[in-house]
Image (cartoon, rainbow, N blue to C red):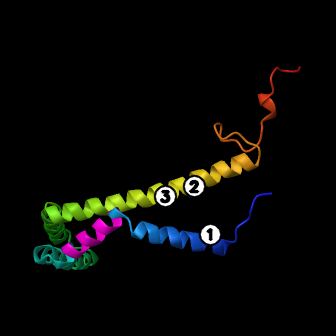
Amino acid sequence: MSKQYTKQQIVDHAKELAKMIAETEEVDFFKRAELQINENLRVQEIIAQIKSLQKEAVNLQHYQKQEALKAVEEKIDSLQDELDEIPLVKEFKQSQTDVNHLLQLVSTTISNNVTNEIIKSTGGDVLKGTTTKSPFDAHGCEH
């Protein structure tokens, strides 16, 4: 029989894995990009304007001021476009995407390998993705 692990052991290993991920090049780049975003005055000004307009939009929506709401939403979209064109913001968003891809890769790898281990341990076929041998796979048909 194979070794069994406790939930706590698995959580402890997950914490180790998280620490490893936090020390990757992708996460390091993300942290540096975030720091630069937070220190960039123009970026912070645009973000503050967007937040203020979003609050205004909520109020206009509440009071059903459709025309004014449309104008505010257009201003928000314009500021968001301006923000997205700043190279630093592009780099930051790309770093977010890279970190998310890494996390997704880890999650998918764990999921696929757990599934494969279950299939193997039940005498199944990994290629077919079945957990038990099918009686229909026997060679020849007996009628």
Q: Quadrant of residue 31?
A: bottom left
Q: Point out residue 112 in the picture as x, y percentages from the top left corner.
A: 58, 51
Q: Quadrant of residue 103?
A: bottom left
Q: Residues within 10 Å of mark 3 (few under 14, many from 20)?
A: some
Callout 1: 10 Å neighbours few (<14), some, many (20+)? few
Q: Give the residue at mark 2.
A: 111
- Identify the secondary structure beneath mark 1: helix
Stretch in magenta: 26-36
Q: Position of residue 75 (x, y in %)?
A: 13, 68
Residue for point 67% across, 51% down: 117
How many discs mark residues in the rendered view?
3
Frontmost of labels 2 and 1 is 1
Task: Name the residue carrying label 1.
Answer: 10
The image shows residue 27, relative to residue 45, as above or below, that is above
* Magenta-colored stretch includes residue 4: no
Residue type marked 3 = Val
Tell me which secondary structure the magenta stretch mostly adopts: helix
Q: On the image, numbered disc 3 is attached to which residue?
A: 106
State if disc 1 and disc 2 touch (CB < 8 Å). no
The structure residue drawn at horizontal position 23% and vertical position 76%, both measured from the top left corner, is 35
Gap between marks 2 and 1, in whole Å?
A: 14 Å
Q: Secondary structure at mark 2?
A: helix
Relative to 33, 119 lies left or right = right
Q: Earlier in the sequence, mark 2 or mark 3?
A: 3
Who comes first in sequence, dot 2 or dot 1? 1
Q: Give the alpha-carbon distance from disc 1 to disc 3, as whole Å.
A: 15 Å
**Residue 135 drawn at (x, y percent):** 81, 33
The quadrant the C terminus occupies is top right
Question: As shown in the figure, which amino acid type bears the numbered disc 2?
Answer: Ser
Circle nearer the N terminus (1, 3):
1
Q: Amino acid at mark 1?
A: Ile
